[in-house]
């Protein structure tokens, strides 16, 4: 055996020891290196995609931190001095459902979905950081008593939520912008993030 070969064997031996040492965590459980790193990265990616949707005007316009619904991609205050009113459904004379029907109106440009209303004040997200939004979203005292299962259901099936991907045309006849990822990808992201324990990544 020449000296080059010995160097090679020693190097391979050292490398093996390093890899094995790295894949055993402090509890002594075997954790494949790759899957550990990828799942943390995946979680962060899912979280940031979810936040890109939640902070899009299509969601945020109904989740303000004041009493006024917003309109359009520029989030201007709702016309006609529309405000939260009684039970988040507006005032009697100008209830949200006077104008907002259960479907979009392609002629007038009034958007619509069943039980159109402003999200309750405890679910206001505007102006909060991603971490704060996630904390509110997960907190049963602010989210309407929803556990993880109910949240996944709401996020993936509620008509007001899914309206964001079929937002119709505005009063000028222009198509409203949809959130930055497709509905299918969004649903997958929601399911994966909750399946992983809904962990809020630390920066
Ligand atoms: C037309 C107004 C409207 C739009 C648009 C809207 N929401 Fe909501 N949202 C509401 C109302 C009203 C509630 C409270 C309903 C309830 O608790 O059943 C709510 C509640 C929620 C909740 C539960 C509360 C919480 O803090 O966990 C989540 C999650 C949510 N919305 C997500 C979204 C997402 C995501 C979008 C956009 C893709 C969206 N919403 C778009 C009106 C809206
Ligand atoms: C007098 C009729 C009228 C009433 C009442 C009304 N709206 Fe609207 N709303 C409209 C019209 C018209 C538009 C479309 C404006 C546009 O896109 O140019 C609109 C748009 C919106 C949008 C914008 C959606 C988006 O993402 O751009 C939201 C959110 C909204 N309304 C919420 C509400 C809420 C909540 C209430 C009750 C508190 C309400 N509206 C009451 C007529 C009304």
Image (cartoon, rainbow, N blue to C red):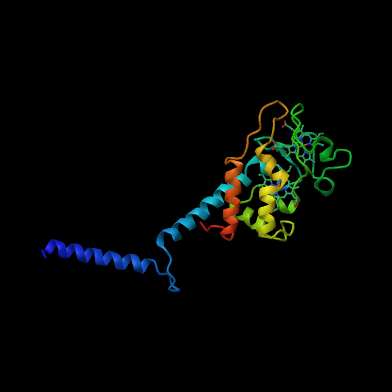
Tell me if 145 is positioned left or right of 19 in this view.
Answer: right
Residue 125 position (above or below residue 111): below
Residue found at the very far left of the displayed protein: 2
Residue found 86% across the figure and 42% down from its top: 91
Quadrant where the N terminus lies? bottom left
| Quadrant in which residue 135 is drawn | bottom right
Q: Is residue 14 left or right of residue 171?
A: left
Pick the residue in front: 61 or 46.
46
State the residue at coordinates (45%, 61%). 36
From the top left corner, tell me how far across and down residue 170 is, in percent: 71, 30
Q: Position of residue 109 (x, y in %)?
A: 74, 30
Q: Residue 124: x, y in percent?
A: 70, 50
Quarter-wise, where is residue 56 in the image? top right
Q: Residue at x 51, y 50 (%)?
A: 45
Residue 203 relative to residue 107: left or right: left
Q: Could you say where residue 67 lies in the image, as x and y percent from the top left?
A: 76, 45
């Amino acid at each position: 055996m020449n000296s080059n070969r010995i160097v090679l064997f020693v190097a391979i031996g050292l490398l093996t020891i390093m890899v094995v040492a790295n894949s055993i965590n402090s509890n002594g459980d075997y954790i494949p290196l790759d899957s550990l790193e990828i799942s943390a990265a995946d979680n962060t990616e899912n979280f940031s995609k979810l936040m890109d949707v939640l902070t899009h005007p299509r969601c945020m316009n109904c989740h303000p931190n004041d009493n006024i619904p917003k309109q359009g991609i520029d989030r201007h205050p709702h016309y006609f001095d529309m405000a939260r009113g009684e039970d988040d459904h507006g005032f009697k004379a100008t209830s949200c459902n006077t104008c907002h029907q259960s479907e979009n109106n392609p002629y007038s440009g009034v958007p619509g979905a069943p039980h159109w209303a402003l999200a309750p004040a405890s679910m206001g997200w505007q102006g909060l950081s991603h971490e704060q939004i996630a904390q509110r979203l997960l907190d049963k005292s602010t989210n309407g008593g929803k556990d993880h299962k109910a949240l996944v259901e709401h996020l993936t099936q509620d008509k007001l939520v899914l309206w964001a991907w079929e937002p119709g045309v505005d009063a000028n006849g222009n198509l409203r912008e949809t959130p930055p990822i497709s509905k299918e990808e969004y649903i997958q992201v929601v399911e994966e993030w909750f399946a992983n324990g809904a962990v809020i990544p630390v920066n």
